[in-house]
């Protein structure tokens, strides 16, 4: 490979979900190369998203109300400036999606068909094809990307690491060698595939977090994992999701005796996800069963209005129109991630992060339903604008020659069953110091072993377990059995790096610094 000349290399986008493809489209006409480890639509959580996109579109709604709901759900750790900017930008992003080919559900009068989901004070969630929003939106984006000359997509091209030096990030490492880039955008998704009970594709293992951390980037809010309360307990891995929209239309949660589980809780069946997940977990731990009952509220309309849920039920031998759906919480979304600023910039020059892999401050300790696809869309625009306005950085030697040999072996494509079981058992819905300490010990032994193919999976899991041990309170998606109270004012958001994530962290919690502004 010859030395890089004056011609600018492309922007490299790693990941082909909504965050990655929207970033690539927003970057046009700059040359972009999108890298995805599998085929398009494969192993991306976007394609599995049943929920839609939240935006203040109704006559009785406003971005300020959407912001207030976002902050309330985030339990004191949402960055208000980010929430204000994202909710204000939401309507324009939906208009752009329509221009890219997404066909949002409309009322017979032609207005937006707005759904209600948990912890929203208004109907503001738009869908495409009922509960098939994710795949429909992804298909529209793929078609638009394929018709955009400035974008090249490389399928079945896993990224092994970042090209980084003291000057920042200059590209990525592939199996066949180094690929230099004007900028790198990580859009690799979340980490819920690290858990034995998950609604995510099994490839959602936090690869981007491990990649960025090994290059020196910070990881923020790693302890906050959202467990979706209504994953379908039908013996499948990953677990099918019973979308929150079902409860928005009147479906209820009941115990084994048929009694309403959430009747005595503020918000009822539409309380925040962390509240409902905790209640279901407690019932299951006590030996009870929990079900979603949509027989009266939805009944015979299941097949037409919620085809994905209906198909998953029927595959398990359940007719949701006449039978209860067994459910339990499962790892669903990571509120933490690579620390970024309000333009998606990491603390490494040349590296941006977009979507679930990033921690923007929008979600705080608990994500508001249907804000995830929105976050990816909004930050895709801001990241593209930031990259386009940034001077072209030199990558003079980044692409010379093959990747130097190292002592490491390739990361395994799937997480070892013992890691998944450990995460669900010790770093799951309910945590305590003893379980977290055991997890940290087991994960540390692998995360810092250059010859172990599970090292990156263990490293990402170790960030979650370490941050969870160091947060000595319960808040949002983080519940400590031994620290059940929520502190006021909240302790600061935690920023960890590979240097501070020592192989032998303290066995007991250390006091956190006083609450401050968002980690940047």
Image (cartoon, rainbow, N blue to C red):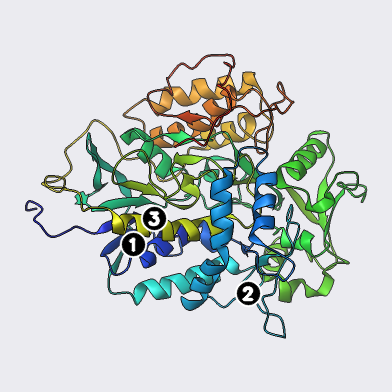
* Distance of label 1 from label 2 (alpha carbons): 27 Å
The residue that appears at 44% across and 39% down in the rendered structure is: 339
Closest to the observer: 301 or 267? 267
The kind of secondary structure element at disc 1 is: loop
In the image, residue 53 above or below residue 169: below
In the image, residue 145 above or below residue 81: below
Write down the residue under mark 3.
383
The kind of secondary structure element at disc 3 is: helix
Write down the residue under mark 2.
129
In the image, residue 480 above or below residue 79: above
Q: Are marks 3 and 1 in contact (CB under 8 Å)?
A: no
* Distance of label 3 from label 2 (alpha carbons): 29 Å
Nearest to N terminus: mark 1 or mark 2: 2
Picture coordinates of residue 33 (x, y %)? 28, 61
Q: Which mark is on residue 155?
A: 1
The kind of secondary structure element at disc 2 is: loop
Which image quarter holds the C terminus?
top left
């Amino acid at each position: 490979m010859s030395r890089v000349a004056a011609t600018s290399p492309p922007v490299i986008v790693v990941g082909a979900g909504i965050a990655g493809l929207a970033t690539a489209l927003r970057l046009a006409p700059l040359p972009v190369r999108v890298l995805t480890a599998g085929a398009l639509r494969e192993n991306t959580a976007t394609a599995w998203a049943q929920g839609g996109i939240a935006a203040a579109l109704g006559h009785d709604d406003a971005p300020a109300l959407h912001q207030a709901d976002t902050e309330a759900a985030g339990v004191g750790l949402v960055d208000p400036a980010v929430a204000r900017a994202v909710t204000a930008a939401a309507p324009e992003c939906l208009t752009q999606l329509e221009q890219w080919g997404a066909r949002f559900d409309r009322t017979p009068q032609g207005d937006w068909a707005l759904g209600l989901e948990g912890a929203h004070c208004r109907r503001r969630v738009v869908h495409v094809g009922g509960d098939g929003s994710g795949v429909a939106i992804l298909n529209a984006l793929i078609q638009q990307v394929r018709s955009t000359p400035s974008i090249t997509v490389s399928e079945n091209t896993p990224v092994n690491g970042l090209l980084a030096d003291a000057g920042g990030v200059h590209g990525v490492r592939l199996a066949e060698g180094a690929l230099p880039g004007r900028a790198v955008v990580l859009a690799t998704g979340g980490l819920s595939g690290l858990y034995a009970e998950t609604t995510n594709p099994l490839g959602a293992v936090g690869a981007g977090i491990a990649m960025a951390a090994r290059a020196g980037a910070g990881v923020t809010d790693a302890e906050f994992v959202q467990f979706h309360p209504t994953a379908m307990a039908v013996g499948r891995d990953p677990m099918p999701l019973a979308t929150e929209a079902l409860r928005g239309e009147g479906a209820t949660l009941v115990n084994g005796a048929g009694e309403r589980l959430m009747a005595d809780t503020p918000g009822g069946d539409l309380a925040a996800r962390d509240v409902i997940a905790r209640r279901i977990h407690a019932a299951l731990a006590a030996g009870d069963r929990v079900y979603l009952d949509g027989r009266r509220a939805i009944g015979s309309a299941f097949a037409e209005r919620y085809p994905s849920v209906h198909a998953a039920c029927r595959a398990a031998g359940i007719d949701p129109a006449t039978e209860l759906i067994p459910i339990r919480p499962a790892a669903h979304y990571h509120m933490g991630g690579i620390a970024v600023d309000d333009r998606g910039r990491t603390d490494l020059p040349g590296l941006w992060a977009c979507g679930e892999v990033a921690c923007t401050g929008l979600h705080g300790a608990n994500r508001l339903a249907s804000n995830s696809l929105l976050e990816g869309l909004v930050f895709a625009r801001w990241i593209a604008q930031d990259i386009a306005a940034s001077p072209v950085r030199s990558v003079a030697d980044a692409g010379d020659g093959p990747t130097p040999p190292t002592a490491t072996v390739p990361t395994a494509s799937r997480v070892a069953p013992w890691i998944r079981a450990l995460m669900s058992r010790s770093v799951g819905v309910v945590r305590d110091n003893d379980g977290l300490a055991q997890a940290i010990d087991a994960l540390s032994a692998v995360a810092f072993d250059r010859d172990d193919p599970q090292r990156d999976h263990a490293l990402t899991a170790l960030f979650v377990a370490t941050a969870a041990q160091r947060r000595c309170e319960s808040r949002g998606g983080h519940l400590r059995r031994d620290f059940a109270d929520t502190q006021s004012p909240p302790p600061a958001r935690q920023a960890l790096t590979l240097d501070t994530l020592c192989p032998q962290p303290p066995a007991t919690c250390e006091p956190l610094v006083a609450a401050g502004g968002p980690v940047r």
